[in-house]
Image: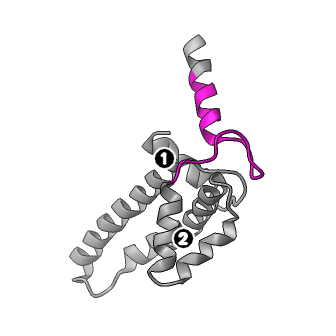
Amino acid sequence: MDFPTAIKTCFRKYVTFTGRASRSEFWYWFLFGVIGGVITGFIDGFLFGGGVGLFNGVLSLVLLLPSIAVSVRRLHDIDKSGWWVLLSLIPIVGIIVLIVWYVRAGQTGNNRFGDDPLAAVASDAAFAGQA
């Protein structure tokens, strides 16, 4: 999955906590959030002198639910319950465990949370090649 497709997918699945998300979808979404945060941080610094994070705060609120949703779907891809995202509430250790899981390759084939997201991409590419 490429960068624009990942962003469109995450916005389309704004609060969809079911199904699976590939590594590329998750990490492109993460990159989008970082880039957006840097840009809004510069805008806030320029307009408000760094005292008020108005645009950064609005961006954070807009990205909150889709970020949680893609995190849950990413955990589903490695066949873990989405409730494991609550590990992020444990300082340092919880975040490290989640990062390790987010980096892992997803389970090949279908699992209890749905179809393999990479299989759908591969079949779309094969179909496009036949057209």
Position of 65 relative to 127 (above/below): below
Give how far across and how far down residue 22 sits, in percent: 56, 47
Q: What amino acid is labelled 1 in the image? A: Ser
Check the image and report above or below for 36 versus 125: below
Q: CA distance from mark 1 to mark 2?
A: 19 Å
Please indicate, yes or no, whether residue 130 appears anywhere in the rendered image: yes
In the image, is 125 to the left or to the right of 111?
A: left
Q: Which residue is mark 1?
A: 24
The residue type indicated by label 2 comes to Leu
Q: Which residue position holds label 2? A: 64
Considering the numbered disc 1 on the image, is that residue within a helix, a strand or a loop? helix
Q: Nearer the viewer, residue 107 or 67?
A: 107
> Which of 105 and 41 lies nearest the eye of the viewer?
105
Asked whether 46 falls inside the magenta stretch, the response is: no
Mark 1 vs 2, N-terminal side: 1
Q: Which corner quadrant of the image does residue 129 belong to?
A: top right
Disc 2 element: helix
Magenta stretch?
Answer: 104-125
Give the percent coordinates (x, y) of residue 8.
Answer: 54, 47
Specify the label residue 61 is tagged with: none
Label 1 CA crowd tier, 10 Å (few <14, some 14–19, many 20+): some
Question: Among all residues in the image, which is located at the extreme right?
Answer: 112
Position of the C terminus by quadrant:
top right
Foreground of the two, 37 or 126: 126
Q: Residues within 10 Å of mark 2 (few under 14, many from 20)?
A: some
- At a point 63% along the width and 41% down the height, the residue shown is 117
**Residue 39, relative to residue 41: is it above or below?**
above
* Drawn side of residue 48 relative to residue 78, left or right: left
